[in-house]
Image (cartoon, rainbow, N blue to C red):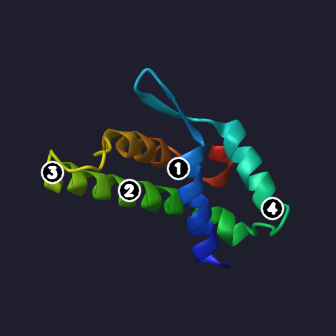
Amino acid sequence: CNDYLMYELAICINALCFDKKNKKFLINRNKVKNLIKGYESIKKINQIEKNSLNILCRGAALRYLLTRIYDYYNTPKNAFIKIKDPNEYLQKLIIHNNFNNYENYYN
């Protein structure tokens, strides 16, 4: 099992497979299916890797949430960078926390 590649897939799911509607982020299962289908056209995902996807998606969302919270409170307001809203990844983390297996990303 290559956890690093599965973590990269989890990061991609968080970055690419959510749609924003009225300030609310919703998972787009069709995007997840297509991302995984493309991934599996190169490397099949075994059952151990499938079992790890949810916890890796949670970890990836938590990592970005914490980074955004840190930046929100520690970046000078006059900095040239755009401070991103941590709430995006809080919403994504909540969605992942409501899932409990690989199939939840499809159904």
Q: Nearer the viewer, mark 3 or mark 1?
A: 3
- Determine whether, in the image, residue 78 is placed left or right of residue 34: left
Q: Quadrant of residue 5?
A: bottom right
User: Does 62 sit above or below residue 29?
Assistant: below
Label 3 to label 2, Cα distance in Å? 14 Å
Residue 79 spot, x, y in % from top left = 20, 50
Label 3 to label 1, Cα distance in Å? 23 Å
Q: Earlier in the sequence, mark 3 or mark 1?
A: 1
Q: Residue at x 72, y 51 (%)?
A: 35
Q: Earlier in the sequence, mark 3 or mark 4?
A: 4
**Residue 107 appears anywhere in the view:** no
Q: Which mark is residue 73?
A: 3
Badge 1 is on which residue? Answer: 14
Q: Residue at x 67, y 69 (%)?
A: 49
Q: Which mark is residue 64?
A: 2
Q: Farthest right residue? A: 41
Kind of residue at badge 2: Tyr
Camera-side residue of 32 and 12: 12
Kind of residue at badge 3: Tyr
Kind of residue at badge 4: Glu
